[in-house]
Amino acid sequence: MTEPTPPCDGPGGELLAGRSSAGRAPAGASTLARHISRVAAVFDAAPIGVGIWSTTGELLHANPVLCDLLVPPPGGLTGAPITAFLVPERAAGAERLLHELASGARNAVECDLLGRRPDGSPLWVRAQVTAVYGPGARPAYLLSQVFHFTDTRLADAADRMAEEAPVMLWLTDAHGIPRVGNRESYAFLGEPPVGGDLSRGLFEHLHPEDLRTGLELLAERVEARESLEFVARSRRHDGAWRWLRHIARPRFGPSGEFEGYVGVTLDVTELEALRRELAETNQLFRAVIDAGPVAVARLDRRGRITYLNARWAELLDDPELRLLGARWQRLLPPDQVRDIVERGLASAEDGEAFTLRVRTDSLTGMLADPAAPDPGSRFWVELHVAPVRDDEGRPDGWVATLTDVTAEIAAGSRADQLARVLDAGSDLLMITGRNGAITYVNDAARRALGVDSAGAGAPPRYLMDVLDPESDRLFHEVVEPALVAGGIWRGELTFRSVTGVDIPVSAVFVAHAGDAGRIESISAVARDISDLKAAQSQMLHAATHDYLTGLPNRLLLYDRLEQALARYRRYGQPVALLFLDLDRFKPVNDQMGHQVGDAVLVEVADRIHRAVRETDTAARVGGDEFAVLVEGIADPHTLTALATRLRDSISSPVRLAQVTAQVGVSIGLVVVDDDNADADTLMALADSAMYRAKASGRGGIVSWSREPGS
């Protein structure tokens, strides 16, 4: 066989002829040259970068791909030492590994070589170098191969970031047990990074009060292959209990198999302490506003009363809170109104609260005849008024508290804070009376639902007015019995605004009973979860549809196939399945590029979708494999006509912006009968029929039929 000419110019070509770059003929050089010549002839046609090196690290031969990839040193490629192509900062370590490789101490090593992109810019590529042994059981030469032309230093940087991140990063096995972690994970447990046991601490050494709940949640999520998030206490290596927030997402292998979780653990001990302190403070505020003797009122910027707590009913002898929606001036003698108005305007300007004692009257008879209040009902209170500003810092009214001076109860500041929270919060707050009439709504509920509380000048609105029909039924059948039995209900339902807009909410209903145990009012706190529902819908769509074509994926196809088979077994509804595999698609991908291949797949998916009925399910089940689920058609001629229509449509040329591509399709068809009426069997039979169609010359249509005697 004639020895090939070295593909790269430069000194050192004589090495293949049996001489080293130093001019000496090494022992066995001619035999080695012949062997390398034969190997080089094979690798010159390979689509990967291949280099043949002497055991002393000189380049003996580079195939065309490697010639185009490497940056030649001043003396040329052939005969150049491998150190000329190494990452400078790693050259010493790489030389040591290559020496061990040449001496037989190692079989293979990886190193980074300096390459170049088509535009001439530098590109570091990862090469795998292996020793090739000769007859003497010693390395005769070294073989380098470059499979991926990507800058591996980016991956190294990512690995370093993960390893040195100030949070705990970890991977679990398919049972949810952490097996691999970064340095922070092992440091928390006091375990060595090499040989340490990560599984003992993060999940198994939970606080006794959190152990059962945490492990049950973990098991539930693992079984459902769903994301995991929970907060629990774990013991650190020094014995301290720390609050940890565990967040994990499932990871799947190339074939869709569940491999475990990738997770992050954050130490939230300080945040948890603040959260608990805030919860206790809020609970204290609620207790003050509900049980305290302080009367709290909220006034808008025009001075109209928009909120009154229950204490007003006692102070003013107004059990129905008829003052709600009225102006506060009706409570005071005219000579005191001017002083309060001036102070109120000043407080709105400078943001300062003020306090003074005022004389007021009960509402008995006053609302009916404001000019003639009952003189026997006059008493003194301490009025504390604080201005309120909106999110932009503009005056937005006042919060006023009335305290019986005789009782000398000073809980104004806490009541003021709670009143601000109630009125300025983003959650929807409502209170209804015994008859369901809405007696209070906060600003958020007013804006979202378009309703106002009773007595605010608008027609009465009822709780049923802001529930959609399904939630109305749920309230009567589920919520009301729960309130009667336990006084509280939590769950999800849908509010409907007066303009017809549906708002999904997560709500808490609390029943308030009177002295006789009868429910007198109901409070509702609801949070708009529209974004959450939209995100859930998007996640469901992403999980059940192909990302490229938008068609249902294998998971959704199986679900609809199971439903169709259930209808077949129950009603005898005909079911057929077509399995489509594209012909000549690989050359499109290989010769025109993956972008063209993706565009062809999208066009094929559109053609399939247009060729079938709206009631049929067209799905992408693999790279270039599609399936069509058909119900209600038992006639084999009609099904064959559908398959023919699909074949003809798909086989038409696909004209893109710059190129025209053409593929074909082989189709397997199977009709359900009592012997194959399960999803797995049906898929297998359709797949088998498709392969028979492909084997018959491609472009064929084969209907599966049971062989005689089978």
Image (cartoon, rainbow, N blue to C red):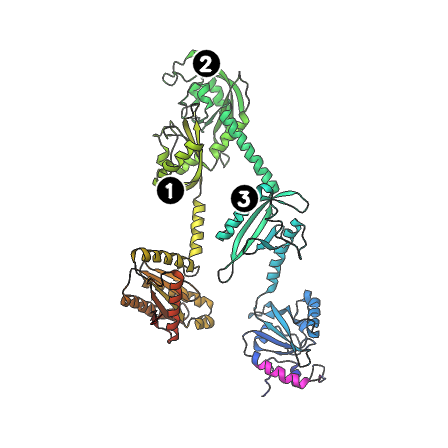
Amino acid type of the residue that numbered disc 1 sits on in the rendered structure: Asp
Give the foreground label among 2 and 3.
3
Q: Is residue 466 visible?
A: no
Dot 2 or dot 3, earlier in sequence: 3
Q: Would you say residue 37 sits in the magenta stretch?
A: yes
Give the foreground label among 1 and 2.
1
- Left or right: residue 679 versus residue 413 is left
Q: Name the residue under label 1.
A: 502
Image point (28%, 62%), residue name? 633
- Whole-percent x and y of residue 178? 59, 53
Q: Would you say residue 469 sits in the magenta stretch?
A: no
Q: Tell me the CA gap for discs 1 and 2.
A: 48 Å
Amino acid type of the residue that numbered disc 2 sits on in the rendered structure: Arg
Quarter of the image for residue 13 reads: bottom right
Q: Mark 3 points at which residue?
A: 213
Amino acid type of the residue that numbered disc 3 sits on in the rendered structure: Thr
Q: Name the residue under label 2.
A: 378
Give the foreground label among 1 and 3.
3
Tell which residue pokes out farthest to the bottom in this image: 1
Badge 3: residue crowd in 10 Å (few <14, some 14–19, many ≥20): few
Q: What element carries label 3?
A: helix
